[in-house]
Image (tube, rainbow, N blue to C red):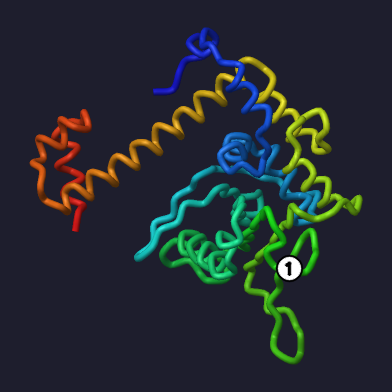
Amino acid sequence: MPKTKNQRAHKKISEETRRQIRKLTLMNNAFMNLVLENNCECTEEILRIIIKRNDLVVKSVRTQKMFQGFGRSVCLDIYAEDNENRRYNIEIQRSNEGANPKRARFHTGMIDTHALKAGQDFNELPDCYVIFITLNDVLGLGKAIYTIHKYIDDDLKPFNDGSHTIYINTSADDDGSEIWKLIHDLRCENPDEMYLPQLATRVKFLKEQEEGVVIMDDYFEELQAKAIAKEKKSIIKKLLRLGKMQLEDIATCFEMPLERVQAIAKTVK
């Protein structure tokens, strides 16, 4: 259960935790999620630079947005919609494998699948932007931003299906451009040195104001608890497959209600 503002005010944060928080950058997936969750202003500030549209207005933004598929599902880092119904997916990718072009295709397909209701015409399908912000130059051409277009063979006429894929290479050197200012802010630890005002204000609140620091600490504690629960569930599944322990014994060992172990057992194949 989330802590109340009064509970947060009395929480003691260690100096080591404060030091770790100060060193975070927006290339940390969890930190980026916390900065942008339900924050249309910061998301809009980022997208305006990437899409090169100063009139872009974000009307909603969610982090860790889950889309269920018929086979594989997907959890999007950041999912936003603007006032013209365009859809945006921003992914922070620290490994090259996570920015595979076919992953971008899959994300676009999943968003499209959930964008139309039964009976809607295909012409009503909104434009979709999948944006990979990468630690390295995944595409290897030395550019700060890659915008991938579709063209008709030979004629090089645009094939306007409304899908767009963009890569932001955060290892790019300073060229003074607006996109580089965004890259600088994504890599920057100190909010006082950031260029984007909305983003800087939000980062400064979370890193330096006491309420923000406590929110950060609670958030990362919650993430850690989820990671431990996921690992515990994985171990229980392995034990169930071995079939050498009774459900009651597993529940006792993991200090878990028997009903929860029984529910996990039903998912084991």
Name the residue that disc number 1 marks: 140
Q: Is residue 129 above or below residue 49?
A: below
Q: Position of residue 37 (x, y in %)?
A: 57, 37
Helix, strand or loop under label 1 = loop
Name the residue type under label 1: Gly
Please give the count of numbered marks on the rendered protein: 1
Image point (34%, 42%), residue name: 231
Q: Position of residue 112 (x, y in %)?
A: 51, 64
Q: In this view, does 52 lie above or below 58?
A: below
Q: Position of residue 121 (x, y in %)?
A: 51, 70
Q: In which quarter of the image is the N terminus?
A: top left
- Rendering quarter of residue 211: top right
In the image as oriented, which residue stretches furthest toward the bottom? 154
Image point (84%, 54%), residue name: 173
In the image as oriented, which residue stretches furthest toward the right? 176
**Viewed as shown, does residue 184 lie left or right of 176?**
left
Image point (83%, 46%), residue name: 181
**Viewed as shown, does residue 209 lie left or right of 52?**
left
Q: In which quarter of the image is the C terminus?
A: bottom left
- Rendering quarter of residue 233: top left
Answer yes or no: is residue 155 visible: yes
Q: Where is residue 2 in the image (x, y as percent from the top left)?
A: 44, 22
**Viewed as shown, does residue 109 lie left or right of 189?**
left
Asked whether 114 or 5 is in front, the reply is 5
Image point (21%, 45%), residue name: 264
- Label 1 neighbourhood size at 10 Å, few (<14), some (14-19), many (20+)? few
Answer yes or no: is residue 124 visible: no
Q: Is residue 40 above or below residue 242?
A: above
